[in-house]
Image (cartoon, grey):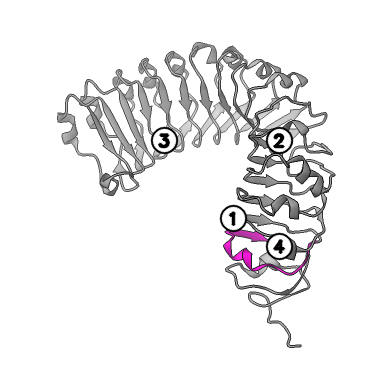
């Protein structure tokens, strides 16, 4: 018997705290509360009185306070998912008693302190999600004790040190390795190139340095690769990720010159982010290389040395959501740009774009056209003056009024 509450039915209006009377439902084996934003209070203690409880999903609510130190008493649990709440303090050491757990999902809370060494006892776990907290210290080196682990998500914490060597033991089955947005450092280890099933590799926003090993060419199953905002240097290896869908190499110390052919030839590519990668091409050439893929959603080529026109890359692309090309050498008439209805984010600042601003900017959520050569009266929009600054002959609200001829 399960107890459900989510945004697909009237229970989404539930508010307040859990009633202790729920402990009377002795046959309850599952609790499923998702996206109930008005659900508050501490960790619900009634669960300790439910002997058959195996699945707990209380996600995206406002539960807060520490996780109970005796959480290990819930020894029948197979799934504990508390993502998107406000739990704080350390992960209790007694969690090591939850040896039947398949999934432990504590992401996007306010948890702090190190990963407890007792997690190595969770030998059945295949999904470990601790990202989006304030966890700190070095990532422990016990991953060879978790032989079934498929998904390891530790991004957006405060971990230091390097990538532990015992992660190499997961090479046969690991699907997700997410370590982005921490304070990790050192060289990216070569053993990751031996991961046979890896689909997502996120090492972004850390302090990794040196070169990416040539052996990473063996990572043919990867579809999501994020190495952005590190200190990686040339030479960048020629990879073989033919099914790549998300690629971000932005803001390292690369001088790629060209957009990698293995990326543009993928029919699955929806997000291409190569900001600050030393790319020197004409935008029309990139548009031609992407000719077989009209379904891309996000392109970020900011802070490169790209010239030419963005018209062929943008016009008629019904799936394009975001296009960022600030700080290049683009030169084209913006009047020729036909913004698709799908487009929400556009940044062409610090280029040499000329002509008038089209009325279609009113459908955007974010816009930056500053420091170009645009001219004429601005169409009505919600955007502030800073968006249009540095264009000498633009006029009309929110800029000064146009002069009468």
Q: Which residue is mark 1?
A: 344
Q: Position of residue 208 (x, y in %)?
A: 70, 30
Earlier-in-chain disc, 2 versus 3: 3
Callouts 1 and 4 close, C-beta under 8 Å? no
In front: mark 4 or mark 3?
4
Q: Position of residue 52 (x, y in %)?
A: 23, 20
Callouts 2 and 3 close, C-beta under 8 Å? no
Position of residue 99 in the picture relative to residue 304 (left or right): left
**Residue at x-position 72% and y-position 34%:** 263
Q: Residues within 10 Å of mark 3 (few under 14, many from 20)?
A: many
Position of residue 125 in the picture relative to residue 391 (left or right): left
Q: Is residue 40 visible?
A: yes
Q: Which residue is mark 2?
A: 230
Q: Is residue 118 above or below residue 80?
A: above
Q: Is residue 176 above or below residue 44?
A: above
Earlier-in-chain disc, 3 versus 1: 3
Q: Which residue is mark 4?
A: 369
Q: Which residue is mark 3?
A: 83
The front one of 245 and 391 is: 245
The front one of 141 and 267 is: 267
Q: Is residue 142 visible?
A: no
Q: CA distance from mark 3 to mark 1?
A: 28 Å
Earlier-in-chain disc, 1 versus 4: 1
Q: Residues within 10 Å of mark 1 (few under 14, many from 20)?
A: some
In front: mark 1 or mark 4?
1
Magenta span contains residue 238: no
């Amino acid at each position: 018997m399960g107890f459900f509450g989510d945004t697909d039915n009237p229970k989404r209006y539930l508010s307040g705290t859990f009633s202790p009377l729920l402990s009377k439902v002795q046959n309850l084996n599952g609790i499923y509360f998702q996206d109930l934003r008005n659900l508050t209070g501490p960790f619900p203690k009634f669960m300790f009185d439910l002997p058959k409880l195996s699945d707990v999903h209380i996600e995206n609510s406002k539960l807060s306070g520490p996780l109970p130190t005796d959480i290990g008493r819930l020894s029948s649990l197979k799934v504990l998912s508390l993502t998107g709440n406000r739990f704080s303090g350390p992960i209790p050491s007694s969690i090591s008693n939850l040896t039947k757990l398949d999934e432990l999902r504590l992401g996007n809370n306010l948890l702090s302190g190190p990963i407890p060494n007792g997690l190595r006892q969770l030998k059945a776990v295949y999904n470990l999600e601790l990202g989006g907290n304030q966890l700190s210290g070095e990532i422990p080196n016990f991953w060879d004790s978790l032989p079934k682990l498929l998904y390891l998500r530790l991004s957006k914490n405060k971990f230091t040190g390097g990538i532990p060597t015992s992660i190499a033991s997961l090479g046969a089955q690991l699907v997700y390795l997410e370590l982005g947005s921490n304070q990790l450092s050192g060289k990216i280890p070569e053993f990751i190139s031996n991961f046979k099933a890896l689909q997502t590799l996120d090492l972004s926003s850390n302090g990794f340095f040196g070169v990416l090993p040539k052996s990473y060419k063996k990572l043919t199953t990867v579809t999501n690769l994020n190495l952005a905002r590190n200190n990686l240097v040339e030479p960048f290896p020629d990879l073989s990720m033919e099914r790549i869908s998300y690629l971000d190499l932005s803001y390292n110390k690369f001088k790629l010159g060209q957009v990698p052919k293995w990326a543009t030839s993928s029919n699955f590519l929806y997000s291409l982010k190569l900001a600050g990668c030393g790319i020197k091409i004409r935008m029309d050439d990139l548009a031609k290389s992407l000719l077989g893929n009209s379904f891309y959603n996000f392109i970020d080529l900011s802070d490169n040395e790209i010239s030419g026109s963005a018209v062929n890359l943008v016009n008629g692309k019904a799936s394009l959501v975001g296009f960022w090309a600030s700080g290049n050498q683009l030169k084209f008439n913006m009047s020729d740009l036909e913004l698709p209805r799908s487009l929400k984010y556009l940044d062409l600042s610090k280029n040499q774009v000329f002509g008038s601003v089209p009325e279609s900017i009113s459908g955007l959520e974010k816009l930056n056209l500053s420091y170009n050569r645009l001219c004429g009266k601005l169409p009505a929009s919600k955007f502030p003056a800073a968006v249009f600054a540095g264009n000498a002959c633009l006029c009309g609200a929110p800029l000064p009024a146009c002069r009468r001829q």
